[in-house]
Image (spheres, grey):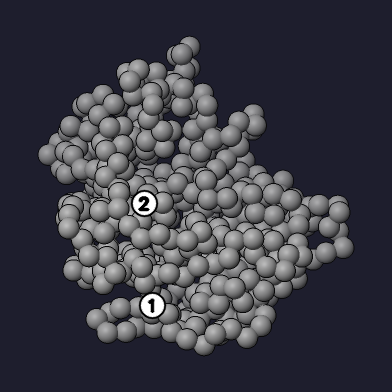
Amino acid sequence: MAVEKAFVVWHKEAELLGPAKPTPQETKELSDIDDQKGLRFHFCMIMFYRANPLMKAKDPVEAIRDAVAKALVWYYPLAGRLIQGPEDKFMVDCSAQGIWFVEADSSLSLEDLGDAVKPPCLYSKEFLYEVPGSHQILGCPLMIVQVTRLICGGFVVAIRVNHVLTDGLGLAQFVKAVGELAQGASSPSTKPVWQRELLTAKHLPFKTTYDHPEYGVVSHEDDPTMDHHNMVSRSFFFGPKEIRAIRRKLPPQAHRRSNFDVITACIWRSRTRALKLKRDEKVSIACMVNIRNKSPVPLENGYYGNGAVTPAAATEAGRLCDNPLKYAVELVERAKERVNEDYVKSVVNYMDLKGRPPILRSERNYVVSDSSKLGFDKVDFGWGKPVYGGTMEGGSGNNSIYAPYRNSDGEAGVLVPVFLPAAAMERFEVELKKLTAMESGEFFEPLKPFLNSAL
């Protein structure tokens, strides 16, 4: 377990880091998926690296700072600023004003950090300094990169980016480019592609209209079942043993379902039971689905805009809790199977017609996404692959971001951060243990979950 220590990171003053060379000065249009109100926030990723004796003469801060500046030549819109156009439509002013870059040092080693490398990161505020005013959406830098040296010779790279500009896959593409340039490449192996105009209503006439429950299941009214002043967070590991145990609870014909579907169904049903919602309450699960290979117009390799939609499955809490797990798995699978070219057209036009509304997130409406295959766990700046690379915060009370993880036995799997009121978390663990019981009757333990109170 990580031992919490106070004042462990010392930050230098944040600097504005611009592209290494002159870049085009222009205004760029965003897609209707980019510009939805539900993406007007920042998200974070983090990577932890061991010391590498072969790199002793190199400073990771300098190497990564220089590589980021070079990458911004290729990804120059990220060095600009969001501006507001007619009808609340956002655009990018490619002004080359730069991103925030923070240099820092820590008194901790990777060994000291222990479990804190997994989401939700215990030292997130230390490893990603909150530059005053940087959470604004319009008129401020679109990205923060912080590199923190550790006393063991390792280091930490944390990144926060404005979600309007890119999604997890797009950010991973940018970070991979930084790694390649840091190791001496003259250009990224994958060239960035803009093409945001292709995912706008004016370019995508549609014939079929789908319902979109993710935008309108229930209201955001306050509910006493979600005590935000008494929230705790715990991370649960799903490796080969846990997946095998869950699949034994499903009929043979359900075994073809993906691990994501099985894990998501477990989390959704266990969470709903733990919250003790009324039986007739409408509940939903929304899953982020990549559309780069489902787009009605070809998106070239290198597209780094928001390329995902969020189909939802909805049912009553009583039906979800009372039915076998197979019921929840099938709902998740059917929601994802809706995503095709016509569905993407419907989402884009729904955004345009409805003023780009946010996804409903509440104790009843849960949103999950999978960062375990984005590639942050493989990014190499010259020191090798990270010990952990993926989501930093892992979600909130109404969403979870799955992360890649390797447990103490060396098993590769998925780590799911869950955020609930303390009493509900206890019930959640009981429900989850019922589903992950091993053949011998033993229960798997979450991977040394640590508890953060008052999130």
Question: Which residue is situated farthest in the top direction here?
Answer: 440
Is residue 241 something one can see in this rendering? yes
Which image quarter is the N terminus in?
Answer: top right
**In this rendering, is residue 105 above or below 418?**
below
Measuring from the top left, give residue 354's x and y in whole percent: 19, 67
Residue 112 visible in the snapshot: no
* Circle nearer the N terminus (2, 1): 1
**Quarter placement of the C terminus:** bottom left
Q: Secondary structure at mark 1?
A: strand
Q: Residue 29 bears which disc, if any?
A: 1
Front residue (pair 55, 158): 55
Label 2 environment density (alpha carbons within 10 Å; few <14, some 14–19, many ≥20): some
Residue holding disc 2: 294
Q: Contact (CB < 8 A) between labels 2 and 1?
A: no
Outermost residue toward the left? Answer: 280
* C-alpha distance separating marks 2 and 1: 22 Å
Identify which amino acid the numbered label 1 is placed on.
Glu
Q: Residues within 10 Å of mark 1 (few under 14, many from 20)?
A: some
Which corner quadrant of the image does residue 329 belong to? Answer: top left
Which residue shows up at 21% across the image and 27% down it? 322
Nearest to the observer: residue 243 or residue 352: 352
Q: Secondary structure at mark 2?
A: loop
Foreground mark, 2 or 1?
A: 2
Image location of residue 73, percent across then percent down: 61, 77
